[in-house]
Amino acid sequence: MLDAHRPMLLGLAYRLLGSLHDAEDVLQDAYLRWVGVDRSAVAEPRRYLSRVVTRLAIDRLRARQAARETYVGTWLPEPVATAPSPFGPPCGPAEHAELRDSLSLALLHLLERLTAPERAVYVLRTAFALPFAEIAGIVGRSAADCRQLHHRAADKVAAGRRRFTASPGEQRRLLDAFLAAARDGDLARLTDLVADDVTVWADGGGRVRSARNPVHGADRVARFFAGIHGPRRRPAARVAPTELNGRPGVVIHWPDGRRYALAVAAADGRITGLYLVGNPDKLTRLAG
């Protein structure tokens, strides 16, 4: 029974946690609970399993938020391939546009601003379109409480979401042009491709060289990437385009073995945010 619902449950846990490793651990814990439950008392297995997975994920979120101060540098979600690629099968579900949008690194990064209950209600309502009465049963709150939690979460997310409204095709065009300009060391072109208030978030986890603080502003971001990929950096990195979290991305392979996943957010014809994940623990599924 758990296998029949696994794609949905994995997608739910990943959206709640931003970590496929943690999501798989949650599903394992849910399986152990399912083995021990009286099945005759479970009228709707999907709803029961959703409740178990959500509550286990909330517990993990709270523990992680308490321990986040020890993480070296910026914490970003673990990127996953969401289309067939050299990096393995997609992480589902992501078959509908709304579900794909709810997987983006930009949105998952924004969701880190929310409390654990706010995030759970937001994901269940926005990504899975569950009614508040059903969400209430899953998270153990009243429907009125869930409406209020969703309202607060949506307000926190709204301003950030306006900064990544570009279509996937526009994102791919901007990302490809940005990387080409970086390889050429073309600061003028790089600056033209990004918004004035663009930000780079880089996650090395203390394991690889990476900016420990966000890099803000068009000029600083242009110089940052020109320094990494410009003509003086030889041999050049190999760049493998792929779909990451439902949106265009690349995996960057350096000759010394380091790898980075890069995704962008964009709006109004310019890049508004770049998400650079180099922590090897978060790239084990992007090793192709």
Image (spheres, rainbow, N blue to C red):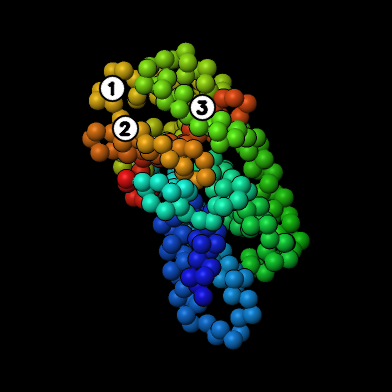
Nearer the viewer's eye, disc 2 or disc 1?
Answer: 2
Q: Position of residue 187 (x, y in %)?
A: 44, 15
Q: Residues within 10 Å of mark 1 (few under 14, many from 20)?
A: few
Q: Is residue 287 above or below residue 169?
A: below
Numbered circles on residues, count:
3
Give, as a three-letter code, the residue at label 2.
Answer: Arg
Gap between marks 3 and 2 measured at Cα: 18 Å
Q: Secondary structure at mark 1?
A: loop
- First in sequence: mark 3 or mark 2? 3
* Element assignment for label 2: strand
Q: Which residue is mark 1?
A: 233
Q: Residue at x 52, y 21 (%)?
A: 193
In the picture, the quarter occupied by the C terminus is top left
User: Residue sitting at 34 percent across and 50 percent down?
Assistant: 284
Identify the residue under disc 2.
238
Residue 208 falls left or right of residue 187? left
Give amino acid for label 1.
Answer: Arg
**Observer-nearest of 173 and 77:** 173
